[in-house]
């Protein structure tokens, strides 16, 4: 009987691993296909002849994408945006989540602020008023236009607030008895305990700032101020006069199509997130589960 149960358990685990493996391959297949297209020649990509391996392997799309100095400028703008915007999101999220995690008898205006936050999640003033406010504040064509409008990520605030509410009250009471103030409890007790939730909201902020392109498109007046995603969205292959090109340049242009170039854009834009995610992944699930539970 015991052997039968052991055999059934092994079969169940084996089936589970097979299913998870298939799901993993299905998730990786689009990324692998995109890489294969970006490394293929123009005719093969245009004819949809690329499957899992590049056809006519070449680096022409990447060379065309990287040869422009504006690419590196846009890359730097995105790095600045992620650093500044991520830090601002972190500070605002922590400083708002802590007081909102207090009980209503300790923070009398808590429910009012919560209703305001929920209201902003459900309703928006619209694109035109949003643009006019930024314009009146003279933020157009500056880095602040990209980070200040989204300085308070409401979803992250609610997620971290619920995580704070799950911290045992005994810790807070013991710290209060020792004379600790709110700032001491926040930075010495709540933040060290809340690393999974903080890693989760930080990952959300980084991905949101890195992948955003629309605000850069309408708030930046000069292409030198475009973040990377806006630059990639605007990038096209321009052929002005092939008579002035040498044979190697003409061969390179003929190997590039909009499909291969777009695939190269996607691959390049994924690299920073793929580098950052493994360091935060071990906190991600734990933070999401605990932060989504309300007492």
Image (spheres, rainbow, N blue to C red):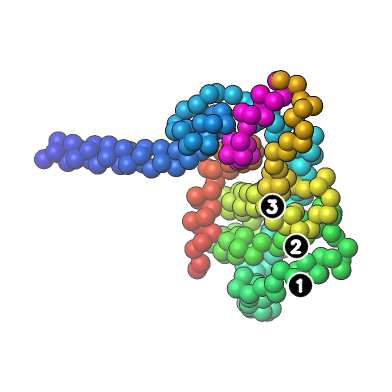
Foreground mark, 2 or 3? 3
Query: Residue 210: x and y, percent?
Result: 67, 47
Quadrant containing the N terminus is top left
Which numbered circle lies on residue 149? 2
Look at the numbered discs 3 and 1 and tell me whether their residues touch, using CB distance below 8 Å: no
Residue for badge 3? 213
Residue at the far left: name it.
Answer: 1
Confirm whether the magenta stretch covers residue 176: no
- In the rendered structure, the answer to whether residue 4 lies left or right of residue 243 reads left
User: Upstream in the sequence, badge 2 or badge 3?
Assistant: 2
Gap in angstroms between the C-alphas marked 2 and 3: 14 Å
- Crowdedness of circle 3 by 10 Å Cα count: few (<14), some, many (20+)? many
Residue for badge 1? 129
Q: Which span is picked out in magenta?
A: 248-266
Residue 171 is at least partly visible in this image: yes
Foreground mark, 2 or 1? 1
Query: Residue 52: x and y, percent?
Result: 45, 31
């Amino acid at each position: 009987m015991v052997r039968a149960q052991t055999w059934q358990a092994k079969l169940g685990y084996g089936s589970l691993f097979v299913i998870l493996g298939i799901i993993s391959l299905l998730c990786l297949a689009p990324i692998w296909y995109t890489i294969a297209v970006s490394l293929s020649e123009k005719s093969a990509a245009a004819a949809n002849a690329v499957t899992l391996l590049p056809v006519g392997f070449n680096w022409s799309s990447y060379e065309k994408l990287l040869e422009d100095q504006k690419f590196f400028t846009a890359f730097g703008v995105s790095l600045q945006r992620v650093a500044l915007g991520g830090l601002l999101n972190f500070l605002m999220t922590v400083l708002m989540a802590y007081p909102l995690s207090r009980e209503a008898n300790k923070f009398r205006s808590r429910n009012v602020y919560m209703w305001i936050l929920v209201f902003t999640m459900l309703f928006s003033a619209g694109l035109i008023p949003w643009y006019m406010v930024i314009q009146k504040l003279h933020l157009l064509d500056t880095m602040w236009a990209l980070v200040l409008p989204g300085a308070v990520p409401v979803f992250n605030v609610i997620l971290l607030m619920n995580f704070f509410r799950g911290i045992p009250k005994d810790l807070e009471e013991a710290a209060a008895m020792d004379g600790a103030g709110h700032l001491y409890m926040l930075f010495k007790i709540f933040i060290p305990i809340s690393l999974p939730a903080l890693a989760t909201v930080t990952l959300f902020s980084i991905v949101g700032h890195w992948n955003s392109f629309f605000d850069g498109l309408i708030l930046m007046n000069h292409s030198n101020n475009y973040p990377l995603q806006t630059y990639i969205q605007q990038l096209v292959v321009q052929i002005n006069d092939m008579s002035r090109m040498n044979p190697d340049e003409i061969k390179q242009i003929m190997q590039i199509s909009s499909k291969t170039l777009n695939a190269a854009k996607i691959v390049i834009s994924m690299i920073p997130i793929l580098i950052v995610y493994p360091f935060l992944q071990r906190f991600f699930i734990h933070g999401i589960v605990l932060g989504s539970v309300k007492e």
